[in-house]
Image (spheres, rainbow, N blue to C red):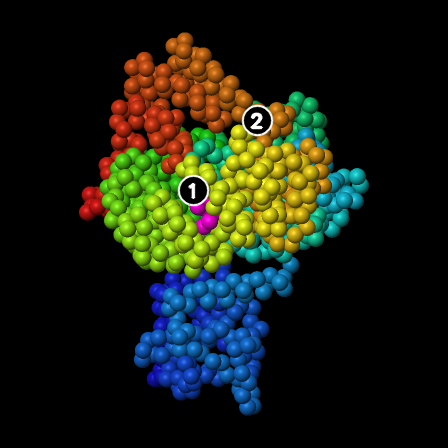
Amino acid sequence: MRRPESAKTASAGVTQVRQAVEQHLDWVFREQPVEDYGIDAHIEAVGDGNVLGRLLALQIKSGSSYFRSPTDGGWWFRADSDHFAYWLEYSLPVAVVLVDLTSRLCYWQLVTRSAIERTQGRTWKLYVPRHHVLDSSAVEPLLAAAEAGALSRLDRQPVTAPVKGLTANALEVHAALPGTGAYAEAPPHYLVRTHDHQLDEQVREALGPHARSGIAVLVGPSASGKTRALYEALHRRVDGMSLAAAGWRIWPAVNPLPPRRFLDELPHVGPKTVVWLNEAQRYMVDPEADTRAEIANGLRELLGDQTRGPVLVWGTLWREYWNQLTRKPADLEPDDFVVARRLLDGAHIRVPDRFTPSDLAAARQSDDKRLAEAATHSTGVGVTQYLAGAVDLVERLDTATAAERAIIHAAMDARRLGHDEIVSEIFLRNAARCYLTETDRPPADSPTWFDTAVADLLRSGKASGPILHQETGGYRLDDVLDHKGRLLRRSEFPPAKFWSAVAESNVPADSRLRMADSAVSRLRLGIGLRLYEVAGGKVAGRRITALAAHCARQKAFEAAEELVFRATNAGETMALRMWATSWGREALSDQRQIDLLWQAVELGDPKALAPLASRLEQAGDKVGAESVARRALNLGSHEGFSAIVEWRDLDYPDEAEQLISALPPGARSAVLADLVSFRESVGDFDQAEQLALAAMEAGDAEGLITLLELRVSSQEKQAEVRRLLNRLRPDLVRDPLRLALIHAHLGNHGKVRSLVKRRLSAERELPLLFGDQDYELDLPAYTPLLLDTLHGMGETALVTELQELWHRQRFSPPQEEEQPEDEQGPNDLEDRAGDAYATLVEFHATRGELQMAEEFAGNAEALGADHGLVFLIRTLHERGEQARAEQLGLRLVNNTSVGLWGLTDATNPGSLLAEIRGNSDVVVLGLEADGTTAAPWWLQTAVPDGSWAAGQG
């Protein structure tokens, strides 16, 4: 029987579309070969190596017959009305793809009501433009269509579920030992403790007459009862009513949501909703910086929006995640979690891992035998941890076979170093092999070694659940062992082939980036570079830029320049600009700086225009400088002209002022203010004042306001400030809050009050000075002094209004005062215990009792206090015990999370290790996986076995 020609044509068309989707879009293509009712395939968007859950449906038509109805710039595709009705009502956006088998090009068009036209009879037609080629140019519009389709579906679907309809298991309450009798199917009897009363108070406020929104994050170790406490608070009656009985709902009803989908659904959350953030690090730590900042800002907006309240935002975190999110960064350290820190301010509720004596006594009297047994026998672990099977899990770890232990350790290391919860089988299989010793490896040569070991780990124990849980896409390590691994293996660094598995296996891109960060923070710079380059993308480019900056700070300029170009190849053009204008200037000639800035501009970095204009002006190319500055101005930046004006003002001040006067009004005002600031900074006070006053007489007060802000903080110049204030025209002041702050410095409280009221009554928004929400916003005009002044005047209403205004602008007033001693965060007891152990380290080390000192150093480390170990290492170094000092120094490096910003700091573990080894190259070159000093990794390339070989630089 002959195969119909039409079948061959159709098959060839599907194949051509598959190639276009997989090669040009780099998306996932899924053919629908069975029961095709008008949809031939589904495609799923991919971004940064991650599938995004954004889908489109395709109707594929191939052959010359579909190109016989050309029109201006494209073709008409015709089909009957039933097909178009089906596509328009389809649950996903639908695109028709016409395949030209001769040119091997595919042309697409979305099926929308606005794109189709009705013809005579039952036929409709769709215009397919010639420029809609299915190649890389289609990624952005098709992704936008898929995103819009997802949001459209959300509009039609509830994003919440009733509290009453969700079980403890559905909300991820940790499974406990099975019960008997009345408790056979139920969770263990719940004993109300101190933290539960704090939750009850929040429920009382949410259900009360004022219906206040609130946020609470329970902080404690794994299996300490955090999620169970939240679950019980949903159902426990407070003043006769519970959230469940009051009809409250939970969102998201299925955890965890992908971060982007979380953001998509968040605007749909409304009143009487509990935002359920179990394992809140999924949304606040794991996503990329931009995404997690958006999530934190979105939650802050939800809490502050009275029209969407009341809502409760409830979450859980391990202590190390809470520390990561709320720790204030040191000087020069990037503030990666500023938005989350503001969201979490005052939200902590500490959940201790041990019951109090009275709680234990009550538990022993419980009718639930599980609870009574746990209270009686939970030696070394908490009651809730005993109920979660922690004792049995740890015993199974201790008695595991070599193969099982290798798999567990690989999973533990992957999780603590940044891998997502779900670890793929391919990665785990590849990574686990390198944990086997020479003695253990022969059994592992069997092709079934991994499957046999995993099968045992998937089984429940005699008093616990599985060690590994089978999930879609791989395996999940039990929470108890995940948390324990962070303590047991905190000083271990995985072998080199583990990192080869990270680079070469199917590890999600965001996990790979986090694991690369972990390697770099532990001074494995070459490993980090390799993983960044495998991950690719702008985020990886930024990390490589940080490596380049580190090398430049160490005067390793050859390495720095090599890394700058690698970062640029990854798409981060900022690297060229920073190399030319900041940390590379010492190594670059003036002309080389100009060449690099031109490269940055040509690669699409608009921020390179201003420094380029400055360099050209400095080199005497005035025409070129002005041309570049004008390009910057067209893109909305006046800084190029500010740079030119500052150079010319030194020798040709009249020419500088003429250049300003020729600028458009907005730019003229900004450049003039910059010039006033420049003259003030170089001590040309009279000229700064004359320029500011002349501009104000011409109708522009920006320069004078700038001058007042510069002078008002100096007590000696306050008389001058008062004199200049008398010259200021209030009608020219754009933002009254800037003027209010000046009056606050001078103690003019009446003026402060009137100006703040004027600002609050205005409709226009606060000027957004800085757009990067990942860093602390520098708002010099809006400091706590303004709020303190209003507080002192008793203007509490104005304070509240001003704070709400800041909140609506998606950032808070810059105030993060120290908490009173009785209001310290949830880790205060642990911190003090860690400090106490560190003090004991110093006491015993000073007396020469080094073994005792080391034991206490380990206890302090477990509580996050490493300064005791630092003292011990220095003591050993001074006593000439170099081998032990170096061993402990490497342990300290392996347990650090310090970023590149601190690698040269005297207190940094890497610097300490370099001092002990007497080798400053340690800080520049970093370490190999085994802890030896690395070779110049920027001159190396990866080889198939996962190690490094000399390259061509």
Is 829 above or below relative to 419? above
Question: Label 1 belongs to which residue?
Answer: 678
Q: Quadrant of the N terminus?
A: bottom left
Badge 2 marks a residue whose secondary structure is helix
Could you tell me what secondary structure mostly forms the magenta stretch? helix
Other residues around mark 1 within 10 Å, as few (<14) / some (14–19) / many (≥20): some
Is 734 above or below relative to 369? below
Question: Label 2 belongs to which residue?
Answer: 828
- Residue 686 shows up from this direction: yes
Given residues 518 and 7, the one toward you in this image is 518
Given residues 221 and 384, the one toward you in this image is 221
- Residue at image coords 37%, 84%: 64
Is 896 above or below relative to 583? above
Given residues 911 and 772, the one toward you in this image is 772
Label 1 or label 2, whichever comes before in sequence order: 1
- Percent coordinates x, y for residue 181 in the rendering: 69, 38
Please, what is the three-letter code of the amino acid marked with disc 1? Phe
From the viewer's perspective, tell me whether residue 280 is left or right of residue 668.
right
- Residue at image coords 66%, 40%: 751
First to last magenta residue range? 671-677
- In the image, which is nearer the foreground, mark 1 or mark 2? 1
Alpha carbons under labels 1 and 2: distance apart: 46 Å
- Residue at image coords 47%, 64%: 143
